[in-house]
Image (cartoon, rainbow, N blue to C red):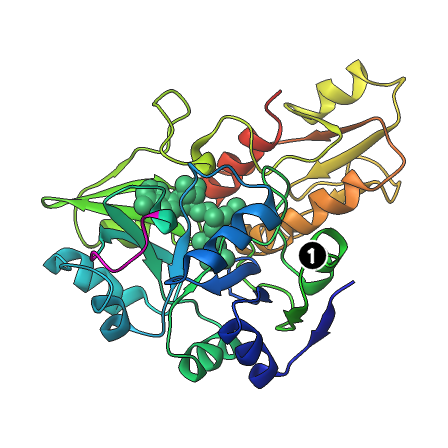
Amino acid sequence: MAEIGTDISKASRLLKKNELVAIPTETVYGLAGNALDPIAIAKIYTTKDRPSFDPLITHVNNIADASTLVDSIPKLAYNLAERFWPGPLTLLLPKRKHVPDMLTSGLEKMAIRVPDHPITLELLKKINFPLAAPSANPFGYISPTTSGHVDRQLGEKIPYILEGGPANIGLESTIVSIEGKVICVHRLGGLDLEKLQTFGEVIVRNTTEAKPNGPGQLDSHYAPKKKFIIGKLDDLLLEHANSKIGILSFSKIYSNSNKNIVLSANGDINEAAENFFSALRTLDNEDIDLILGEYVPQKGIGKAINDRLKRASYF
Ligand code: TXA
Ligand code: MG
């Protein structure tokens, strides 16, 4: 098990020695290492069992720090950064030469964001390099929203987890590139499309049909080990009446058993996002044969939850 604590100096010392540290963000916990050092980057890939074709997101303190890593920031990207950083927005921007190719899996653009968490922002201030940080889970599995989630899966492999409490958004950042005047969304996430639309035309390219440019776009991802079926819960319950089941429902209770987790009793879509990964993990660890779930309303962050539901239940 890893040590869990709030010692930012310790985290910074470890990172400077090319060790990995799990860090809290407002979206999910990240597995962080020096984004400019290929040794630290390689450790991230091996610790997560992540294929090397899946590029990493780089975390910085502010727009000024981002601009030291990228060749240029288009005006529209700059406006988005000014409005939404720190926050759950990742921008794809052309990287400078000194940024290792390993970080981007050879792509010309790097993914970059300013996380909205006081502990991680303070840590970034203390070190003089940016942090590469994918979600701190084994590749393909449910993302971690608490330090305990990280510890249970990666605790043996890393020395330290910075405690920052449960992630308050609970889903990964929205990834966008700017193409001319168009905002192109590559991964639905914590920042609503509605908010992006106030800045211009938004197209979503996070489809499962297109050739994926990252495993966040793979058909199967964020997946529990148990079989997970999404549909109309009333029908699914009849169909699977003879199985040991867990239920992941949006706001309605379908069973009095503690194996029915309700994401938000009063139908609050943001609360549902915050609880989503944690609920899926809890059910995955129950003594059941299968998990039944339903889609949530397609509004605001609900679109990103439904995207995760679809990929988590793909088999
Ligand atoms: O909220 C988040 O973004 C969290 C926290 C820790 O910041 N991080 C996260 O990282 O979700 P990860 O590695 O689990 O997902 C990163 C996604 C991958 O699907 C990857 O393919 C995509 O970002 N990505 C990274 N760099 C890219 C690039 N240059 N072009 C296209 N996609 C990229
Ligand atoms: Mg991930």
Residue 315 position in % (x across, y down)? 62, 20
Say which of 101 and 287 sits in front.
Answer: 101
Q: Quadrant of the N terminus?
A: bottom right
Q: How many marks?
A: 1
Res. 37 image quadrant: bottom left
Res. 211 image quadrant: top left
Res. 107 image quadrant: top left
Residue 18 position in % (x across, y down)? 52, 67
Whether the magenta-drawn stretch holds residue 99 is answered as yes
Q: Which residue, as the protein is rendered here, is positioned at the far top?
A: 239
| Residue drawn at x 52%, y 62% as measured from the top left | 32
The amino acid sitting under disc 1 is Lys
Residue 26 horizontal side relative to residue 61, left or right: right
Tell me if residue 277 can be seen: yes
Rendered view: 254 above or below 117: above
Rendered view: 27 above or below 159: above
Residue 32 horizontal side relative to residue 85, left or right: right
Tell me if residue 193 can be seen: no
Rendered view: 240 above or below 277: above
Q: Residues within 10 Å of mark 1 (few under 14, many from 20)?
A: some
Residue 313 horizontal side relative to residue 209, left or right: right
| Residue drawn at x 59%, y 40% as measured from the top left | 139
Residue 152 position in % (x across, y down)? 76, 55
Tag 1, which secondary structure?
loop
Q: In the rendered image, which residue does mark 1 sit on?
A: 157
| Residue drawn at x 56%, y 85% as measured from the top left | 9
Residue 248 horizontal side relative to residue 66, left or right: right
The residues colored magenta run 96-101
Whether the magenta-drawn stretch holds residue 18 is answered as no
| Residue drawn at x 54%, y 59% as measured from the top left | 30
Residue 43 position in % (x across, y down)? 54, 54
